[in-house]
Image: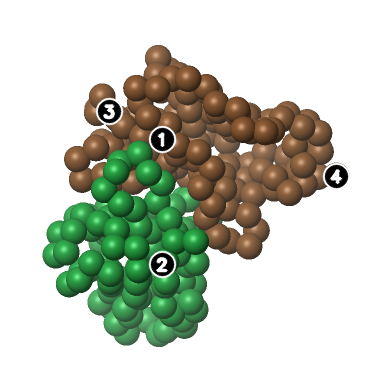
Amino acid sequence: AQKVTQAQTEISVVEKEDVTLDCVYETRDTTYYLFWYKQPPSGELVFLIRRNSFDEQNEISGRYSWNFQKSTSSFNFTITASQVVDSAVYFCALRETGFQKLVFGTGTRLLVSP
Amino acid sequence: DAGITQSPRHKVTETGTPVTLRCHQTENHRYMYWYRQDPGHGLRLIHYSYGVKDTDKGEVSDGYSVSRSKTEDFLLTLESATSSQTSVYFCAISDETPNTEAFFGQGTRLTVV
């Protein structure tokens, strides 16, 4: 069965610090898709990035970067030089092929203080 | 923004009463999902649909039923609401391409008293 684990419940940092959010997944599929979403205090869910299982290239978008490692079943998310606006709950998600059930982790709450 | 609307946005109901939440989309997407969000549990999948009249259970389906009689609407029903079903409910949609993201509704805050 597919499963996503985000072991970090809450992380507190001071502005300008770098922070990494961990995501570990389980799946029997050889083809699958991983996602990160952000939920700011206003409550909506905002898509950040997706990654295919056959594409292990890491990605950088501004202050955000993602490290996908199939060998450790991890898809970690790093924010460089964090800002107060980064304060949110971040969710990692996994979708298998077939019926495309989309499963989320429990989320990591990031608090960035000035 | 993806055309997805949840109704109602807020509801207070009494224990034992039936409740139906509606998710409506204008994107003609094949897949629709219902999640509940609770502190410490993240987003948990209740039910999902992979086509009209095609639905399956998620991890927390007990006490919930769903129906999808047309592409644009996915209904979540609590047959007899309990206090443990007090939660924020999110609907999501996605198209057939598995590597595309899901789009979420604004959520429905349900309180069972």
Q: Residue furthest right?
A: A114
**A90 horizontally vs B74: left or right:** right
User: Which residue appears at 35% of the width and 68% of the height?
Assistant: B25
Residue ID for mark 3: A31
Dot 1 corresponds to which residue?
Answer: A34
Chain B colour is: green
Horizontal and vertical percent position of residue B10: 49, 79
The colour one sees for chain A in the rendered image is: brown
> Callout 1: few (<14), some (14-19), or many (20+) C-alpha neighbours within 10 Å?
many
* Disc 1 from disc 2: Cα separation: 22 Å
Report, in whole angstroms, how far the alpha carbon at label 1 lies from the one at label 3.
10 Å
**Considering depth in this image, is A64 or B44 the residue closer to the camera?**
A64
Residue at the image position 85 percent from the left and 44 percent from the top: A114
Q: Are marks 1 and 3 on the same chain?
A: yes
Q: Amino acid at mark 3?
A: Thr
Q: CA distance from mark 4 to mark 3?
A: 41 Å
Q: Residue furthest top?
A: A71
Earlier-in-chain disc, 4 versus 1: 1
What residue does disc 2 label?
Answer: B4
* Residue corresponding to mark 4: A114
Mark 4 or mark 1, whichever is nearer to me: 1
Q: Give the structural element (helix, strand or loop) at label 3.
A: loop
Tag nearer the camera, 4 or 3: 3
Marks 3 and 2 share the same chain: no
